[in-house]
Amino acid sequence: MTAPRPTSAFHAANTDPSVTDRLIAALDVQAANHGVRRLRAWAHASLAARPGERALDVGAGTGSETQVLAAAVGADGADGTAVGLEPHAGLRAVAEQRAADEGSRARFLDGDARALPLPDADVDLVWCERVLQHLTEPDRAVAEMARVLRPGGRIVLLDTDWATFVLHPAAPEIRPALAAVTQGTAATPDAGRRLAGWLTGAGLAVDAHGCDVLLHDARSVSRPIVRGIGAAAVGRGLITEEQRDRLYADLEAAAEQNAFHLSVTMFAVAAHRPS
Ligand SMILES: C[S@@+](CC[C@H](N)C(=O)[O-])C[C@H]1O[C@@H](n2cnc3c(N)ncnc32)[C@H](O)[C@@H]1O
């Protein structure tokens, strides 16, 4: 089995506590983003979890969406189950703690999306958000999700497409370097556009497409993102230090005038396993 590319921070081998804290902080910031909230709302409405169903959240992270699924399948006192599969021990511990703190019935399990530790046709629902972009074999993971889904069961995949990353203002001559960096940090950076193909390739029937934009505020989230991109572009010899400093200065000046823009598009596809 091929491991996720080490360039992706989200892989189980990254157990350094400071990295784990950074991943948790990033997931929490994203969870508060209006675009993520809107697309999640669309995806939950499309999945339409019902009381008593069995749900699986693949690559659960901090478990926020496993908890949403747990509330839906456990509504009205029903004994539905929601399990979050999470291979990263630090993230899994946070997910377990948060679920306990909030009195959620969500449970968490170690495992790999490419070899799910579940029998065939075991669950009614699968949720998989921003995981496939981190895998070198995303189609294999989707085939696994199809395998554990019962006939008639529903699935929703959500993922980013890094070719849609826009940072403004950036001088035209450095834009290819910025694109190379943003598309080089994930194992499968074009996951967003490939979701429907992976689902149909796994024998599932596509029902609906959704999308939304993560628009980042100039002052808070964007600064570390921009600094990270600038540092990586210089580190890879794609731009000079002078070009990097000019980029930072242009972005700061734009932020002063409310003329800053940083965005990336997320896509979601809902499907079901034909009976
Ligand atoms: C960007 S985070 C998304 C977390 C969560 N789904 C969310 O949207 O908030 C990517 C997640 O994929 C998980 N992941 C990475 N490789 C995986 C694999 N091979 N199998 C399952 N999950 C994996 C990471 O540990 C991390 O929790």
Image (tube, rainbow, N blue to C red):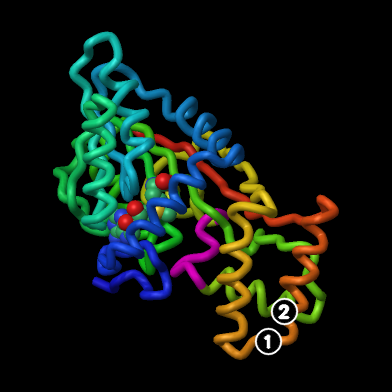
Secondary element type, mark 2: helix
Percent across and percent down for residue 30 are 51, 46
Coordinates of residue 215 in the picture (x, y in percent)? 66, 48
Q: Is residue 69 above or below residue 36?
A: above
Q: Disc 2 versus disc 1: distance between alpha carbons? A: 6 Å
Q: Is residue 238 above or below residue 143?
A: below
Kindly indicate the quadrant of the structure image that contains residue 180: bottom right
Residue at which label 2 appears: 245
User: Does the stretch in magenta take in 21?
Assistant: no
Q: Is residue 91 or residue 49 the one in the foreground?
A: 91
Left/right placement of residue 195 relative to residue 84 reads right
The residue where tag 1 is placed is: 241
The residue tagged with tag 1: helix, strand or loop? helix
Confirm whether residue 201 shows in the render: no
Answer with left or right where residue 55 lies relative to residue 6: left
Residue 135 position in % (x across, y down): 38, 64
The residue located at (53%, 74%) in the rendering is 184
Residue 228 in sight here? yes
The magenta segment: 185-193
Quarter of the rendering occupied by the N terminus: bottom left
Residue located 60% across and 40% down the image: 35
Q: Are marks 2 and 1 in contact (CB under 8 Å)?
A: yes
Indicate which quadrant contains ligand 1.
bottom left
Residue 198 in picture, x, y percent from top left: 44, 54
